[in-house]
Amino acid sequence: HHPPVHQPFQSPTMAPRTDASSPSSSANGDSSSSPAKPAAAAAAAASTNDNGAETEELIMGYTHSQCVAALRSIEGPNSDVTCRHIFGHGNPDHRLSMLQKVTAVRILDYEKNKATLTPIDDLKSQAAEFHAAHGPILNLRTIVQSKSPSMCLAAEFKRASPSKGVINPSATASGQAVTYAESGASVISVLTEGRWFQGSLDDLRSARLATTTTTKGQSSSKYPRPAILRKEFVFGRYQIYEAAAHGADTILLIVAVTPADLLKVLIDTCREVGMEPLVEVHGQSELDVALNAGARVIGVNNRNLHTFQMDLATTDRTAEELTQRGIKFDHHSCSEEDDTIPEYVLCSLSGMSSPTDVDRYRQIGVGMCLIGESLMRAADPAAAIAGLCLDPADYEKKMMDTAASGGAYTAGTKIVKVCGITNAEDALVACRAHANLIGVIFAPKSKRCVTVEQATEVVRVVRDFGERSGRVDVAYPPTVDTMAPVQSLLVKARALEEATRRPLVVGVFQNQPAEFIREIVEKCGIDMVQLHGKEGMAAASRDICSVPALRAVDIETGHDGTGTVPSADAVQKILDAVTSDPAAILLDTSIKGNKEGGGTGVTFDWGIAEQLQNRGLPVIIAGGLKPDNVEEAVTTTRPWGIDVSSGVEQSPGKKSHEDVRKFVGGARDAAIEASKGF
């Protein structure tokens, strides 16, 4: 008979939960008060031996039913409410996920060793002595926000993991932590779980001491002391006191395995000892639990720890959800000279390994990226960290150097433009779908031509969505005008990516006087223009248009999309013609024999776009795109931007909201998949 797993919360060595939700099972381990779930789950995990007798799955020496009971032990009396976000809760046939198994074994191991655990009062004394000798606890939120506008890096130490097995078994926490800190990591994450991750509390303590260079924990001349994060499967207050006694500055709390009421207790306990915890979520229901419990530093795990599936867009969706709720977290705001610092910090916790990944999250206001496996496997972790380009200036320089060297553009699709918008409702749908650019057309011959009043209303809605009151200034480096055309356009593309973190309105013109364009820009408040006629490259300068301008280039085809000009010739013709005047180049289909380009609904040879990008010129592609083919366009060509109009319409000037969402969402998802090979 195994000891009751709830006992650690009741024993003198483990602090009880201070609210009414303490576990209510009897001290003798009687489980009759909760009969169905453990029994059914145990039956689901049962198998038979060679003699036909039923046996249970063993998980690190514990039975499946013991693990189920262990997880039940941390539930309060209102578990139908406090645990409804937990995977499998309420399903008597649920089989534990790997995350749940690891957590359950952690509970059982602490229970098994409870006689040797240090009493909490002693842990509190040890923590006070440690931090008096080696410096105070660092506030995680403050550390992350102090790095703005650079991305804060949490570099992780782990020797192994359940999904990847052994990673780097001979690594030492102290050596790796020093390398990380010297290379620019502001947070060191240390796994302290021993069975699957081969970690320990000794690793935590040694990482802290190795990165503390004076007896009072003051910064050395090489680097500021990094915050030390205990990466653990926390189920009780004891582990928080334990972390503080071993030098931790912060600790991970995983919402996916924590009842809502217990999470509140754990967050409060962290703050009681001076820690600001990192609260991990995956999905909206877990985000709700975290926010309701008072979390301020929210980490989004892009990997579903129940299934191990990775989706880098998980962080994007969480950022959008926070934005729609009016919750301030934007890392860029931390460096602005205003009287407020965002109350929240958003972090991305897995799946990143490249400067493109880091920049992707920088664009949406993420403050910290946690990177582990790629750094643990790297032959030169310092070089790997430098290659992440945590400072946006370093990333910009990298992009400029790539352009200067004639390298290919390989960063993938960053810009999605929905054009032909004629009303506020359609504009708002496009914004909510994560479109970067909202196009309104002023060309009189277009079926989607808008009035000044219509355009002004679209601008108002887009500004309201982006929580801004004026035009967005697309800021270029001062040296951009001295660069070669392709290099200049690459740098401008990077600046436009930064500016379109909030959607911008683009006015589309065709062979109309510059005076008229400037007048419309002023009257309607549009952020950019697009020239779609025979105006030439020079006409797309900011000096002439008063705002940045996209320059459309027609790719002539037949009515069936068959090209009339060999792609190599078309590519060279464009490269010979391009100047530094436009903000970006947009390629669109032009039907042979038609006087005006655009609005054809026909695709051109996307190989032209691919060849231009191979020569270093990022381009937007338009013409014939729709929800059914956007994935193909993004994954095969990987254009810098895509533009849709008629492909998401019910009728000219009226968008299908479902098609807009499918198109933009499909483009974003395809861009993530396409980036995996780069």
Image (tube, helix red, strand yellow):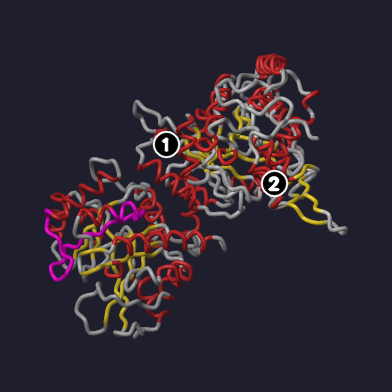
The stretch drawn in magenta includes residue 451 = yes
Position of residue 178 measured from the top left corner of the image (x, y, whole percent): 69, 34
Q: Which callout, 1 or 2, points at the residue further toward the start of the chain?
A: 1
Q: Is residue 278 left or right of residue 638?
A: right
Q: Is residue 56 left or right of residue 560?
A: right
The stretch drawn in magenta includes residue 109 = no
Quadrant position of the N terminus in the picture: top right
Q: Nearer the viewer, residue 4 or 71?
A: 4
Q: Which residue is mark 1?
A: 329
Residue 376 tag number:
2
Position of residue 251 relative to residue 584, above or below, is above
Position of residue 86 relative to residue 439, above or below, is above
Identity, as a three-letter code, of the amino acid under mark 1 = Phe
Position of residue 400 measured from the top left corner of the image (x, y, whole percent): 46, 54
Instruction: Evaluate whether residue 181 shows in this view.
Output: no
Position of residue 364 relative to residue 631, above or below, is above
Q: What is the crowding at mark 1: few (fewer than 14 residues within 10 Å), some, or many (at least 20)?
A: many
Residue 436 sits in quarter? bottom left
Position of residue 331 measured from the top left corner of the image (x, y, whole percent): 44, 37
SS under mark 2: helix
Q: Range of the magenta residues?
A: 429-453
Position of residue 598 relative to residue 229, above or below, is below
